[in-house]
Amino acid sequence: MKYLLRKIWPLVILLIASYVILLTHAVDGFPYDLAEAYAIFATYVLVVGVLCQPLGKLVRPHYNGRGWFACHKWEDGGKIYDRLFKVSKFKDSAVNAQKIFGGDVTPRTMPRDPQVLSAIIDETCKSELVHWLLILISPVMLALIHSWLKWPLWALCIIANFRDILIQRFNRPRFVRLYNRLASKGE
């Protein structure tokens, strides 16, 4: 919990302030609309994000970098994401959901073991799936917010989830390459 608060404390403060404004009806007009939209947005993101985690775990054993999650030649080992979006500059600032929801391993503590590496590849696939699900169901948020502010908040939701998908697509080819190298040495 300390990790989460350290990463998102400004958002938490805004959420609390939004609820205070909504509960006290202290102001009318734009500040009230903004508070209402942000409160709905933040609550929606929190609830849907937590609900999507079990969905990722249900299909987890079937990932391992295949199918939709495969590394493609055009991705150039993930380098295309760095060239187009400069992923290496922002990837370390993203919230690591494994520290919040629990996970098997993290890339920072990765031992040189094919089984552990396979679990890391699965985690990147799970994370990508969860963020795609969040994007797919994000139009529900448009129906919940009754202000023009729904459009910039929806765009923020799409951009934030797309950023996390890019990070997974950037990291996975390196993990798959290392896994293949370690697996071939072990045989």
Image: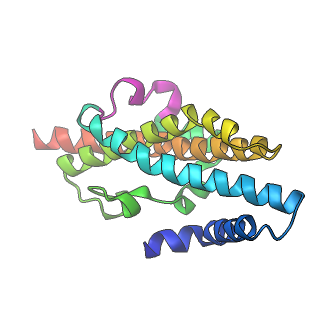
Closer to us: 28 or 79: 28
Magenta region: which residues? 63-76
Locate residue 13 relative to residue 70 in the image: left or right: right
Image quadrant in which the N terminus is located: bottom left
What residue lies at 31% left-to-right and 48% top-to-bottom? Answer: 120
Front position in the image: 134 or 74: 134
Q: Position of residue 110 (x, y in %)?
A: 29, 59
Work out whether 152 lies above or below 23. Answer: above
From this viewpoint, is residue 50 visible?
Answer: yes
User: Is residue 177 something one can see in this rendering?
Assistant: no
Q: Residue at x 21, y 45 (%)?
A: 182
- Compared with residue 161, is residue 28 higher up or lower down, i.e. above or below? below
Q: Is residue 70 magenta?
A: yes
The percent position of residue 31, horizontal first and vertical second, equals 85, 62
Question: What residue lies at 55% left-to-right and 69% top-to-bottom?
Answer: 7
Q: Residue furthest right?
A: 29
Residue 116 placement, left or right of 4: left
**In the rendering, at what x and y percent does residue 98 appear?**
37, 58
